[in-house]
Amino acid sequence: MGEKKEKVEKQPKAQGETTPAATGTQGAKKQKEKKETADTKHPSPGPDVAFVSPLKERYRSVTVPELMKKFHYKNPLQVPKVMKVVVNMGVGEGTRNRDLFVNHSEELMLITGQKPVITKAKRAISNFKIRKGMPVGIKVTLRGKNMENFLFKLFNIVLPKVRDFRGLNPNSFDGKGNYSFGLSEQIIFPEIRAEKVKRIQGMDIIIVTSAKNNEESKALLSSLGLPFKKG
């Protein structure tokens, strides 16, 4: 007699039972639905909105209309603007004390948001024992957002804080539309903590504009908020 082959009957699937492949497909679908729900609750941010500094906004909305009317410019592009700002610290004693260069460099970086470069003597000065090429100071040249932020802070926070301040000298233009003035202390800037200052140090500030003459430059800076002495 031949052997009887055992017949294995295929069991019917219970209701709701799924195959492994189907389970994987449904799981992926659920994860996708979950992600879409999360994205709806927490949408991703759109394109970055360009930040306009308060100084640039004032230039556009106040300065340009004012100067176009005053000087009869035909095109807004003719209105002068600030091109750069140079902040310079002369560190005379730094020739003998390297720590002064380090300290004042850190302070100037805090004040301007930019790393300073060392300035060197262009010629020898025997009376001060300074040789040509010797480090004598530090400076930063500010443009763009760093310049705008620095000027806004200078005009609206720093200068009004100066004791007995009555405005800057309106005659300190160079005839080419550029304006320069000095500050006697670095501690008037909000970034500098007076108790940590090892030595009071002043600085010179030069504001370079595209103005053709002193009158245009003064009107530009005055409109932007630079306080000039009256009378």
Image (cartoon, rainbow, N blue to C red):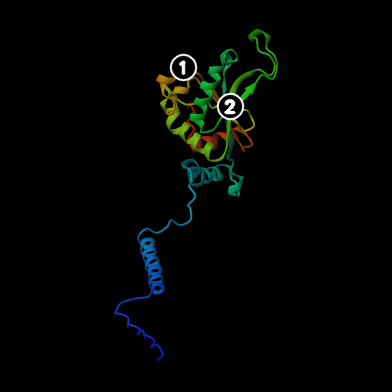
Residue 151 vs residue 45, the one in the foreground: 45
- Amino acid at circle 2: Lys
Residue 170 vs residue 29, the one in the foreground: 29
Where is residue 36? Give x, y as percent. Answer: 39, 65
Q: Which-is-in-front pick, marks 1 and 2?
A: 1
Which of marks 2 and 1 precedes in the sequence? Answer: 2
Q: Which residue is mark 2?
A: 139
Residue 140 vs residue 11, the one in the foreground: 11
Quadrant of the rendered structure where residue 39 is? bottom left
Most extreme residue toward the front, as rendered? 1
Number of other residues with Cα within 10 Å of mark 2, as a class: few under 14, some 14 to 19, many 20 or more: many
Q: Residue at x 52, y 27 (%)?
A: 108
| SS label for mark 1 | loop
Q: Residue at x 41, y 90 (%)?
A: 2
Q: Is residue 109 visible?
A: yes
Left or right: 11 in relation to 120: left
* Residues at circles 1 and 2 in contact by the CB criterion of under 8 Å: no
| C-alpha distance separating marks 1 and 2 | 19 Å
Left or right: 165 in relation to 212: left
Where is residue 64? Give x, y as percent. Answer: 53, 45
Quadrant of the rendered structure where residue 179 is? top right
Tag shown at residue 198: 1
- Amino acid at circle 1: Lys
Quick one: quadrant of the N terminus?
Answer: bottom left
Q: Residue at x 41, y 26 (%)?
A: 161
- Whether 155 is drawn above or below 126: the answer is below
Most extreme residue toward the bottom, as rendered? 1
Where is residue 40? Give x, y as percent. Answer: 37, 63
